[in-house]
Image: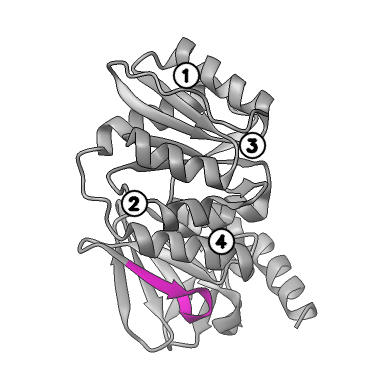
Amino acid sequence: MNDEYRSIIIESGIKTVIVEDEQRSQETLVKLLRQYCPQVKVVGTAGSEKEAISLINQAQPELIFLDIALPDGDGFNVLENIDYLQYKVIFVTAYDNYAIRAFEFSALHYLLKPISHVDLQVAVKRYQQEKNRENDAFSSKISTLRENINNNNQKLMLPTLQGFEIIELNDIVRLEASHNYTTCFLKDKTNIVISKPLINFESVLTDLHFARVHNKHLVNLKYVKKYMRGSGGSLKMADDSEIAVSKGRKAEFIEKLNDFAHHL
């Protein structure tokens, strides 16, 4: 890796910088962008925190592909120390279920290594659709991501009609589907309407201490007070709600509840 980042070349298109310390990964991403996303123009690459800060401040890109792990620091430090702020970020990460969950919980965009051209095209298209929107709560999202990576994914960034709310996982009693929205019920008996369908949360929560017990319900096993038998049965939750368990999900739920109780 050269000590200096690549010379900045100004071209028309989405002005983009790549921050990636692995030379092969860096070159692969440049080639994929050139072949499958010609609207993206890479104006510079950097392989360290120091190089990245200097490059971004000089190039002032619209879009940054950013690897968190860098040899002299990390991507968080890059974002905290650059003066230029008019950018969007797509994080690039090695495959790791824990890290993926941290991105999902923080409502930030990411790509998994090795990067497929299909995923890359989707990410760039999503950027183009969102580029003129305000970067709502970006600093809070970054803070949540960093904290989740360091502290075993304890917080969830919830998109609401008004913006975002950061919630402790242990404060969530249950989530209930309502068409393309989800209502999150908290242990203090308040609730939040989330502008995402329940399936989005099922994919990141059900291998933790949450279980999908019905098409409409995802529950935190920590707050299950009682299970009542029946065709599918029903649950009494800590917030005094009664939740139906569908017949098709009954066996899986009971197995998961037993496993959860065994590890208490």
Image location (x, y in percent) of residue 138: 34, 57
User: Of label 3 and label 2, which has the lower sequence position?
Assistant: 3
Kindly tell me whether residue 89 is visible in this rendering. Answer: yes
How many marks the image carries: the answer is 4
Residue type at mark 1: give it: Leu
Q: Quadrant of residue 157?
A: bottom left
Q: Mark 3 points at which residue?
A: 21
Q: In which quarter of the image is residue 258?
A: bottom right
In the image, farthest residue toward the front:
3
Judged from the image, the secondary structure of the residue bearing numbered disc 4 is helix
Q: Residue 205 carries which label?
A: 4
Q: What element carries label 2?
A: loop
User: Reading the chain from its start, which is encountered first: label 1 or label 2?
Assistant: 1
Cα separation, mark 3 vs mark 2, equals 22 Å
Task: Identify the amino acid type marked 3.
Answer: Asp
Please report the bounds of the magenta region as a residue range.
Answer: 165-173
Nearer to me, 241 or 148 = 148
Local SS, label 3: loop
Of pointers 3 and 1, the one earlier in the residue sequence: 3
Give me the disc on residue 83. 2
Amino acid on which disc 4 is placed? Leu
Disc nearest the viewer among 3 and 2: 2
Camera-side residue: 160 or 153? Answer: 153
Q: Name the residue under label 1.
A: 33
Q: Nearer the viewer, mark 3 or mark 1?
A: 3
